[in-house]
Image (cartoon, rainbow, N blue to C red):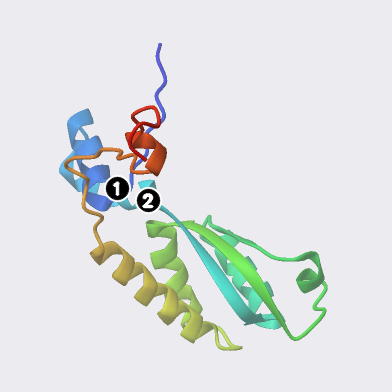
Amino acid sequence: MKIFLRHISSLREAQHELLSLGVDPWGVGIMAKKMLMKIFALKGLSVRAANILKQECIAVGADLALPKAASFLEGESTDAVLMASVSQLEMLVLNLRAQPFGLKEVGERLRDVLRSASNFVYAKPKIMGIMNVTPDSFSDGGSFL
């Protein structure tokens, strides 16, 4: 048996990986989004909203990292890190529509960031090289300084 780590960075790559395995196309449509993990930094989230968001994340299989103080409702606002697959984010955004403390807007912003990120494609480099252009790179031993 062999095990390989795969890095999947786009929906197209996820779909290709599953299709090359022989997964039914209907199943590819469901599973490809589960292969794409996204990490979001949230800044200035109200502490109350952060705790509800944590519960909503766990409910869809995602997670939200919070400072310990936020768990005890200390302070007015907090930062957080959200970790979720695209599939989990889609469910989370739907669930946040019914939540108070500005979480509906948080869901809309997450959806917008996710959409803009999925439309951005990194161009793969075609040629790469290293040029050393420091003065000592062209030394002739000191004859012509």
Determine whether, in the image, residue 27 is placed left or right of residue 39. Answer: left
Q: Which residue is mark 2?
A: 36
Above or below residue 46? Residue 131 is above
Give the residue type that dot 2 points to: Leu
**Where residue 92 sits: x, y (%)?**
47, 68
Q: Nearer the viewer, residue 133 or 111?
A: 133
**Where residue 142 sits: x, y (%)?**
40, 32
- Which image quadrant: the N terminus? top left
**Where residue 8 sits: x, y (%)?**
33, 43
Give the residue type that dot 1 points to: Ala
Res 27 seen here: no
Q: Nearer the viewer, residue 96 or 5?
A: 5
- Which image quadrant: the C terminus? top left
What residue is at 63 percent from the left and 81 percent from the top?
44
Q: Nearer the viewer, residue 27 or 11?
A: 11
Residue 32 circle label: 1
Q: Are marks 2 and 1 in contact (CB under 8 Å)?
A: yes
What residue is at 42 percent from the left and 20 percent from the top?
3
